[in-house]
Amino acid sequence: DVVMTQSPLSLPVTLGQPASISCRSSQSLVHSDGDTYLNWFQQRPGQSPRRLIYKISNRDSGVPDRFSGSGSGTDFTLKISRVEAEDVGVYYCMKGTHPIAFGQGTRLEIQ
Amino acid sequence: QLQLQESGPGLVRPSETLSLACTVSGGSVSSNNHYWGWIRQPPGKGLEWIGSIHHDGTTFRNTSLRSRVAISIDTSQNQFSLRLSSVTVTDTAVYYCARLGRIAAISQGDFDYWGQGTLVTVSS
């Protein structure tokens, strides 16, 4: 199965500063239909996860535009242009097609 | 509004079988456009996908758990279930059920609705 590897695992950020999380898959995530099913999830403390980004770079409804996704093939990045207090939590990249796989998670905290 | 609710024992003895059910309300597990999945999260750790099922019986399971996992669906009860056999302390986790979008039989990886999660502790 595909293994998803994130870095860093811990990310202290100053409010208003940018943040970036890297995700690498052990195999290309390009599906036979031509799409790349790489998603990003956010899990705030005490909450269930919610999807932020799908198919590399598409924001889900209600997700602020300070979140953006990029990448291709096996290398992907989630960027937050200006971190706000509500962004504290753990971020996971995820291979969206079966068999599904999550990265280890990156814990974002305000320093 | 779709709601999912996990139910089952909160304590399971080592070597026994963990059994959970997820009851869906406000929607139907017979939807052609969705898979129904199980995800777990050990205390203080990350998310692990366990498996997914479609009402036509198509099932996917995490390779690392495949030999111990069984997922079933009961359309008459509008619920789906998880059985994890031969549990050990490492199976202690919050277990979530969730809905997953499906287009042309392809999972969309959205997990747009989640249950609240249920903590299952494996201990003697």
Image (cartoon, rainbow, N blue to C red):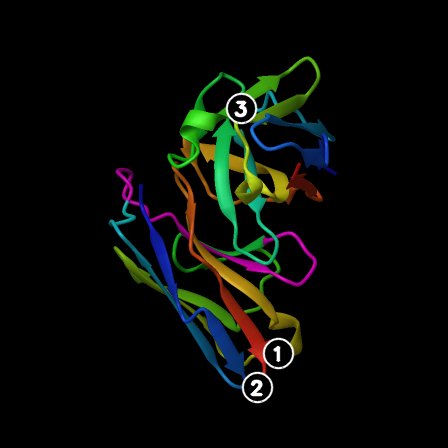
Marked residue chain, label 2: A
Give residue A33's quadrant in the image: top left
Relative depth, front residue between B10 and B24: B10
- Quick one: quadrant of the N terminus of chain B? top right
Mark 2 is surrounded, within 10 Å at the Cα level, by few (under 14), some (14 to 19) or many (20 or more) other residues, namely few
Q: Quadrant of the C terminus of chain B?
A: top right
* Disc 1 + disc 2, Cβ < 8 Å: yes
* Span highlighted in magenta in the image: A31-49
Image coordinates for residue A20, horizontal then vertical, percent: 43, 74
Q: Main secondary structure of the magenta part?
A: loop
Residue at 25% across / 50% down in the picture? A28
Front label number (3 vs 2): 3
> Residue B117's image quarter?
top right
Is disc 1 in the same subunit as disc 3? no
- Same-chain status of marks 3 and 2: no
Give percent across and percent down for residue B61.
Answer: 43, 31
Tag 1: amino acid? Glu
Residue appearing at x 61%, y 53% in the figure? B43
**Residue linked to disc 3:** B71
Q: Which mark is residue A84?
A: 1
Residue A38 in percent (x, y) is at: 39, 52
Separation of residues labelled 3 and 2 (CA atoms): 45 Å
